[in-house]
Amino acid sequence: MRPGTLLRLALAGTRTDTARVLLTALSAALAASAALAALTVLAIPEPVGDPYAQAEQYRNALLREPGLRGGTAFALLLLMIPVLALAGQCARLGAPARDRRLAALRLAGATPGQVGRLAVLETGVASLLGTLTALGLHLGGRVLLGRPDARGQLALPTDVLPAPGALAAVVLGLPVVAALATAVLLRRVTTSPLGVTRRVERERGPRPWSAILIATGLAAFAFGGLTLRSYDDGTAPPVGQVLGLFAGGGLVAMAGVVTGTGWISHTAGRLLHRHARGPAALLAAGRLTADPWAGSRTFAALLAAVIFGAGAAGMRAYFVAQDEIERRQNRLAGVDQGANPFYLATMDLVDLAVAVAVGIAAAGLLVAVVEGIVARRRAYAALVATGVPRGTLARSIVWQSALPAVPAILLALGVGLFLSRGLFAGATQGASSYEVCEAGADICADAVARQQHTRIVHTPEVRVTPDVPMEHLALLGAGALAAVLVTVGIGLLFLRASTAVEELRTT
């Protein structure tokens, strides 16, 4: 098959196929934008001779201080996780119709390899379209937003640009990764002239082995925190080892939560089937036990955002405790300073990033709900034709979505909080001594006279365990559950059209 023919067939299809390509391109554009923003932050040069000198040309302290740029870039890269999960959900949109189209190509004489390359090429081309769009917006934004304010400072690092190799790695690397992921996902799928089948089917429900992943991730994060705190004497810690423990531990714990949702769904379905009495709950129980991994696929992006948000809430509690200790020590020394708003203001930006991640995850959840309703429209239409009310089907879909979501969100909140505790076990302030002058400002300004009015104040070492941020955790959990219910409610708008009796005549 010629390359031109292969490309034309990969982009052919119905309006659903066009929507899938556009949504995949949008997801790739969002992921590439986050990666380009992180690389731009890391591209800010450090002044020669003084690695701690601030870049005064920027308005935001996250960009001025060299020690905060790594965390800012890491937060931007974390935003790619829900975006990539959204891309995975968009790739499943209209899957039954695409499977029938691929089966027709097999019937016309295409080989299984050619059909597989069509699916891979569709994802790769759509992702490349998105990354090129993101690059164009990034370069255009440098021109539009590169005007300094009255003090000559920039709001964004529009005066720097990542290396050409880094730009090429993002623009070309993301489509390659997306294409390879599609090829891996299709390795157990066989496309025949009669349809698409999987070679291996799961005969039993999932086991709670994901708890081992969660425990391993938490242990790695805690060990990384201990390693970092062991270098409080001023020596430089092993940066590569610490970053590897933090990144690896966080990803392993996140994978454990996502895969654990499959076991949660299966267990919830079994309990619901045992104790439920209504038809809607029984339908949801059957669906949860038949496909427990649907919850892992559906809630992956949302749970990743919740873990990140819970970790940010734990970090905020640490900064509040640390600021309170410093203020207490200053009052003992006779200095009453107000709260330091820098770190809390930084956490406000992190909370904004979490809100954006939850919104992106909600979009992916909406795509998954709509895709599930459309994919099972013949089964739903058959139930309606036999007399099952549409309201019963709607309630079963709500049961199916909300029942595993509640424990999964609680698990994600707990894991995120424990990850932050591994990094910041407690707020500490070492013992110190202060010289306090108890006279007027004129006497204290005199080096000789102040000696008669000074005293030494010794402050002991203080260690405080940060409070559990119940308010922030409750708000984050309620927001995530509300996102689930709202997206399910919007998806139910497609239920009436998908349960028409005419759907029984479709192929």
Image: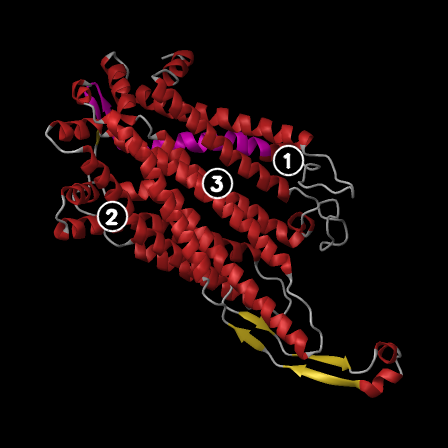
Q: Which amino acid type is shown beneath numbered disc 2?
A: Ser
| In this rendering, position of residue 209 left or right of residue 3 | left
Disc sitting over residue 80 in the figure: 3
The answer to which quarter of the image holds residue 39 is: top right
Give, as a single range, the part of the protein colored magenta: 167-196
In the displayed structure, 233 sits above or below 277; it is below
In space, the residues marked 3 and 1 are separated at their CA atoms by 20 Å
Assess disc 2: are there few (<14), some (14-19) or many (≥20) residues with their C-alpha within 10 Å of its C-alpha: many
Name the residue beneath numbered marker 1: 163
Secondary structure type for disc 2: helix
Q: Which image quarter is the C terminus in?
A: top left
Residue type at mark 3? Met
The mark nearer the N terminus, 1 or 2, is: 1
- Separation of disc 1 and disc 2 at Cα? 45 Å
Q: Nearer the viewer, residue 40 or 146?
A: 146
* Residue nearer the viewer, 165 or 362: 362
Image: 493 above or below 47: above
Does 204 sit above or below residue 441? above
The disc label shown at residue 265, or none: 2
- The answer to whether residue 154 is left or right of residue 113 is right
* Residues at marks 3 and 2, CA–CA distance in whole angstroms: 26 Å
Q: Depth-wise, is mark 1 or mark 2 nearer the camera? A: 2
Q: Is residue 279 left or right of residue 352?
A: left
**What x and y, as percent, mark residue 111?**
28, 18
Q: Earlier in the sequence, mark 3 or mark 2?
A: 3
Q: Is residue 162 left or right of residue 5?
A: right
- The answer to whether residue 228 is seen in the rendering is no
**From the viewer's perspective, is residue 141 above or below residue 50?**
above
